[in-house]
Image (spheres, rainbow, N blue to C red):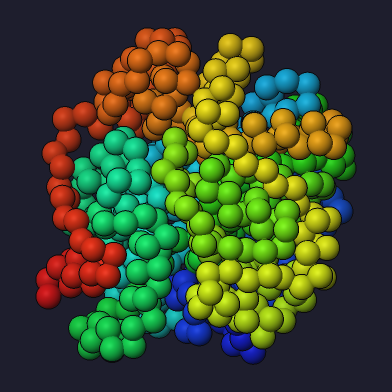
Amino acid sequence: MYYVSTRDKEQKFTSAAAILQGLAPDGGLITPEVFPKLSVNALETMSDMGYQQRAVYIMKQYLDDYSVTEMMNYCNKAYGNGKFDKDQPAPVVQVNNNTSVLELWHGPTCAFKDMALQMLPQLMVAALEKTEEQKKPVILVATSGDTGSAALAGFADLEPTKILVYYPEKGVSEVQQLQMTTREGNNLAVCAIEGNFDQAQSGVKVLFGNKELQNELAEQGYFLSSANSINWGRLLPQMVYYISSYIDMVKSGAIAGGEEINVCVPTGNFGNILAAYYAKLCGVPIGKLICASNANNVLSDFIQTGVYDRNRPFHITSSPSMDILISSNLERLLFAFSDWDSDEVSKYMSDLAQYGRYEVSNIVKKRLDSQFFAGSCDDAETKACIRELFEKQEYLTDPHTAVAFEVLKQYRAATGDKTQTLVVSTASPYKFAEAVLEALGESAVAGVAGLEKLAQVTGTTIPTPLQNIEGKGIRFTDVVGADQLGEPLMKLLGR
């Protein structure tokens, strides 16, 4: 299988090259030429498999360069060896008669990013040999909170990689910040920026587009790559958990085989819900894709109107991983909905860069309407939802997942659709203990003390990876301007 750029479908890449490169040379996102359909009995065939085996079965169809033996080894390293606190890394929990929750936060950093970022490093290091790449990769990551800690956990001390994470100085929770700034490893660095996530993400893209920098790094034996969801090696493992969760819902009796489900995803950068759309393309019976936004509702506005406009106030919310106004992965959906028209996609992206907005064609808008529903909620609604879920369903959730539950409520009120729905839970409530405590009517306590209080109030257990966070020394304290991202990069490389 070959991969193409969203901005030039004549550019072709092997699977190993796509993963190693991350971003196409023209700035486009690398996407498979085709999405192989699962065979009629594939879901049934995978029913008795463990998660690792399912992952191999699914991902191998997209990774021609990798053998089954290699993939099994990588999946065991990623999802086995006690890295996840459940036998099944992505368990499905029934909340009520027509709502299930896909819990994606049982990994080493307690967020859904672990599902992909335990796998991507394995694939990337192998790709060095497969492409005969002699230079060493330097992984640049812009994070709104969870990607950074998950990427650091995946790449720490993994030779020959180096990794640098940028996060908004005032845009992550205290626990998220501690997870990053205390991370051990000889090949990594973390730096705060004076700005928001969009500025961090834009700054990283500027580094990728800096030819002079690329040449300087090449002379030193390095090249830049990405662990953000712009990398296909992030999206492919995410497709796995949607397919696997459908199989588990059939096995549990929540649905019958072949029965359609809806999927509701809290998202800011669009990668998580895009993976659900790709799973649907593969043949999983998914009906409506429900896109849930917080007060930074650029995505929900876009899906409702067909106009993407980032010219709006930026809000710091209780769900910081969704505090994003430039959703990079949306470009891949535009590519699919415009029938692979690279010129059309390039025009949208050019307009976004120049004017901060674009409006899609009538054809793209009709396809959005047929596949997606979108809604948003503010912090007050989010907190009310956390409290209601805990009091009525005895289910404790974080602010991001609560946004999804609230938007699902909006969808059902607007449509009357009672289809069994899978809500994607993206983070442990303990990563946002301060906000969750406040939502439950308790006095908010920040940092590690908040974890202990949340456990006492709710009778739940602090996840093991967060139990160990107190007492670790802070290693990284650098803060730079949004236009100075090259400085910590040179520092990491000893220049």
Quadrant (top left/top right/bottom left/bottom right) for the N terminus? bottom right
> Residue 455: x and y, percent?
38, 15
The picture quadrant where one finds residue 256 is top right
Which residue is painted at 55% across and 42% down in the image?
A: 294
Front-most of 183 and 386?
386
> Residue 433: x and y, percent?
38, 25
Front-most of 409 and 305?
305
> Residue 224: x and y, percent?
34, 75
Front-most of 79 and 416?
416
Task: Using the rendered image of the protein, determine whether residue 219 is visible from the camera's viewpoint.
Answer: yes
Which residue is painted at 39% across and 32% down in the image?
A: 431
> Residue 308: x and y, percent?
62, 63
Q: Is residue 207 above or below residue 470?
A: below
Quadrant (top left/top right/bottom left/bottom right) for the C terminus? bottom left
Which residue is painted at 27% across and 79% down in the image?
A: 222
Q: Is residue 1 left or right of residue 166?
A: right
Residue extending farthest front = 312
